[in-house]
Amino acid sequence: MKQHILKLLLIISLFILHDKALAQLSGSYTVGEGSDYPTLRAAIDDLMAQGNSGDVVFLISSDIEETQNIAIGFDPGEDNTVTIKPAAGTSPVITFSASEDNGVYDGALIFGLSDISGSADALTFTRNIIIDGSNTAGGSSRDLTLQTSEDANGSSSFRLVAATENIEIANTNILINQSDNPFNTIRITSRAEARHQNVRIVNNYIRNLAANSSRAVLTDGITEAQFGPDLTVIDNDIEVNRYGVWLREKGGNSLISGNNISVNQQSNFFGYGVYVEELYSPDAVVQILENSFDGSASANTFAAVRASSAGNFEIENNSFTNLYSDSGITRGVWVDAGGSFQIHANTFNGFDGGSGVRMIEIANDLTENHSIHIANNYFTGFASTSGNGERLDGIYIASPDNAEADIRIYHNTLVMNPLDVQGDGWNYFGISSFSSASISIDLRNNILINNDSNPNVTSYLYRQVLSAASSMDADYNLWFVASPSAADNTFLSRHGGTETNATTLAQHQENTGFDSNSVSFEVLFEDEESPFLDESMFSNDNLLAPAISSVPTDFFGNDRNDPAVMGAHEPEINVNIQPEPEITGGIKLHQNYPNPFNPSTRISFELDASYPTSLSVYSVDGRRVAQLLNNQQLGAGLHNLNFDASRLSSGVYIYRLTAGNTVQSGRMMLIK
């Protein structure tokens, strides 16, 4: 009898284990009214309770109100993923409306936490979780909306708290509506002794206008031992009141690319597009590429990019336009840290500052050595609607404290437009530097033009005051002042005291000992929106200068010749022979050919393996104007595509290749 009971118990145990194994989730499940799960909270709770035996996809089939916030602390395994996305053909809205506190960690949706009311013991390693808001496989449409209600609680909406790996939020509308100071939209913190690896925020619309100090993406509460998160923020449309992307505490290697970032600060705060306040190490790499910045601050300073922590920065191919501060200084790129900075091929155009303009500022409170390479940029569009005399600078270089500054300024085009201001006391400088033996400046192959003629304005293309103690060299530049006049305070340069004021190149050469091979004459451009030279300039040998090896391409991505053309544009003189791109291995996007073009051009790229591949074309303000490939699987080898721009107007366009996790881009010029 006893043996029969033991057998029965063994059979019952086997059935229980069998049923539990069968209960593990795998495959697709619907979420919404009349679905497998009524809410996303119910689906996630079941996943964490039952586990998984393969990939899991939760398909949102209808609008959902989540009256309880959601914690997802779960590891599906190295080879599995958990994906949340809309069902085919739907555009669902998930509204988070919980008004009560979670407990220790605030947030409507928290990654890395197994219990929404839990404390540190609920922190759970979480990986391979994807929110994909497109209702098609491999699509890029934003069909899913995640939003908070007006009465929802908490200052953070979507949050990563424990160690995570491969978390992606893509193709989603993220709307913050609550009235209780919802500062943080996506907040990346760490309360565990490990790091966040590969956090991807891709192609979302992120809007948080509910708090005066709102942020779209924030990293904070991270220690040096945890390292900074590996962060990718690409192709998002961001609208906030204060911070677009804020690496506040121990940011890590970051790619911030292809975003449209709009900041509208209405209170007495600084406003930032990207603010790198602290990195985990000076070896960290921060790439700020191909973004479009549009911002304003009504009562304080606005800066599109600020770097306040030593690191390796690549700030390239961005559009800094329509930037405004009512009573503060408007800055494009603000460097107040040591490290290495590559500031290349950016457009600075349309700066209005109530207390001044500094398109690039290298601040004076630096205590760490820095190397800054400023090349192929275009500067113009200075303005101030203030009624007071203020100061406007293209490149502003202050004296560092106990540090060395090595600054290379090569192949830029800077045009000081006529300044339409009222009243006296205005100062207007193309490049200004304070006197300091710790500053070393090399100024070569630039086109520098002063078109100002306002007698109320004191203007210089180049100005260094006091004793001119800085180590500086300059040559092979074009210096041109349209209306030089000492009486009207319109100068080419000042290198020391006022006795060194120069209105002509000859005076400048005598005062400084620089620019023995430089020239001065009027330069014509195709239009006022880019540094593209007028065709009449293409064959002007007086614009030629020795090539600089650290500047192999121009503003548009064309290869530089030797000798090279001064300024940001290198015209292609010989365009009759169409070259075949050389296959070099790896993933490589080639320069389009021909460039400039009308109306079609060839875009070539090579892959070293098979990848899901996208190729898009954008206007300089960030609008996608053509999709040539959309996540199409392509094999290894050389690929050629023809781009027909017949329906587009003349101008500069950016083409971007995405192959797997690699993103590369180039610029091209359409001239009709």
Image (spheres, helix red, strand yellow):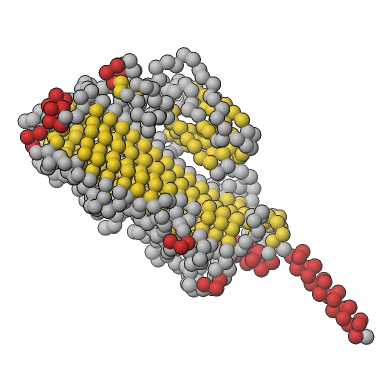
Which residue occupies the extreme top position in the image? Answer: 576
Residue 373 placed where, x, y %? 33, 39
Q: Nearer the viewer, residue 519 or 39?
A: 519
Q: Is residue 535 left or right of residue 584?
A: left
Q: Nearer the viewer, residue 229 or 293?
A: 229
> Quadrant of residue 324 in the image?
top left
The image shows residue 432, relative to residue 8, as above or below, that is: above
Which residue occupies the extreme right position in the image? Answer: 1
The image shows residue 323, relative to residue 123, as above or below, that is: above
Q: Is residue 84 visible?
A: no
Q: Is residue 234 left or right of residue 307?
A: right
Quadrant of image for the N terminus: bottom right
Which residue lies at the image location 59% right of the left edge and 28% below the top edge?
A: 638
Residue 56 placed where, x, y %? 67, 56
Which residue lies at the image location 12% right of the left edge and 41% below the top edge?
A: 467
Which residue lies at the image location 40% right of the left edge and 43% below the top edge?
A: 314
Residue 103 placed where, x, y %? 49, 73
Q: Is residue 102 visible?
A: yes
Q: Is residue 649 left or right of residue 470?
A: right
> Quadrant of residue 111 in the image?
bottom right
Quadrant of image for the C terminus: top left
Q: How many marks?
A: 0
Residue 526 placed where, x, y %? 33, 23
The image shows residue 95, relative to residue 498, as above or below, that is: below
Which residue lies at the image location 69% right of the left edge and 61% below the top edge?
A: 52
